[in-house]
Image (cartoon, rainbow, N blue to C red):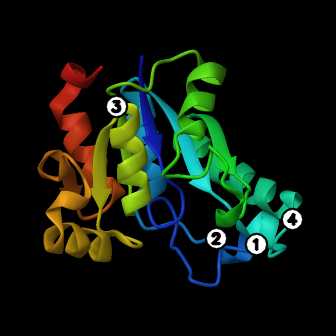
Amino acid sequence: MALLILDRDGVINQDSASYIRSLEDWIPIPGSIEAIAALSQVGFTIAIATNQSGLSRGYFTIDDLEAIHSTMVRLVEEQGGHIAGVFYCPHHPDEGCECRKPGTGLLSAIEQELGESATDAFFIGDSLKDLQAAQTYGCKPVLVKTGNGISTLQGLQANPTELINADQILVYNNLAEAADAIVMAGSRFL
């Protein structure tokens, strides 16, 4: 099996400048649940790596967050897929933790808990922080244009030196399109 890492907000579900505070706020992007299931079905171990500073800001509780994640996992399972783990950073950006992306603490935690290397794993995100964490850790960065993806892409085009290997980032319209490309390429990724 090969590991595949996904950001949550803006990749799997619609993002909000006001934060995703409850299950009612959590709205999957069309095709994302099915895409996760398809990736799982071809042999990828799926892990979610998400910054959730809304916890430390008091915008939602751990129970709210767990309700969202339980629903996400259940929806993927209903489509015949599996999410091996959901890893999140609860810290405020000013706390200076190692787990908040672009830090790589979540990636280390994923490796330790799942027993699989994140080196060369696809990391699909919508923000510069996702891409930076991916490249720093040796993952294959994939940018989707949902969520913050378009503004991230525009930023990369305006300032291509912001990432060392910006020209090696794969770009897709959404998670479903990225998953289709990865699934169609088949076992060479596994």
Amino acid type, residue under disc 2 in the picture: Trp
Amino acid type, residue under disc 4 in the picture: Thr
Which is more N-terminal, label 4 or label 3?
4
| Tag in front: 3 or 2 | 3
- Dot 2: what SS? loop
CA gap between label 1 and label 4 equals: 9 Å
| Tag in front: 4 or 2 | 4
Amino acid type, residue under disc 3 in the picture: Gly
Check residue 26 in the rendering and tell me which mark sits there, or answer none. 2
* Closest to the observer, 142 or 97: 97
Q: Give the quadrant of residue 91.
A: bottom right
Which is more N-terminal, label 2 or label 3?
2
CA gap between label 3 and label 1 equals: 33 Å
Left or right of 171, for residue 138: right
| Tag in front: 1 or 4 | 4
For label 4, count other residues whose C-alpha is less than 10 Å away and answer few (under 14), some (14-19) or many (20+).
some
Tag 1–tag 2 contact (CB < 8 Å): yes
Left or right of 32, for residue 25: right
Tag 3–tag 4 contact (CB < 8 Å): no
Which is more N-terminal, label 4 or label 1?
1
- Dot 3: what SS? loop
CA gap between label 3 and label 4 equals: 33 Å
* Residue beneath the point at 80% across and 65% down: 56
Q: Mark 1 — residue?
A: 22
Q: Please, is residue 142 above or below residue 9 in the view?
A: above
* Residue beneath the point at 18% across and 69% down: 159
Q: Mark 3 — residue?
A: 138
Q: Position of residue 67 (x, y in %)?
A: 79, 58
CA gap between label 4 and label 2 equals: 14 Å
* Residue beneath the point at 21% across and 47% down: 164
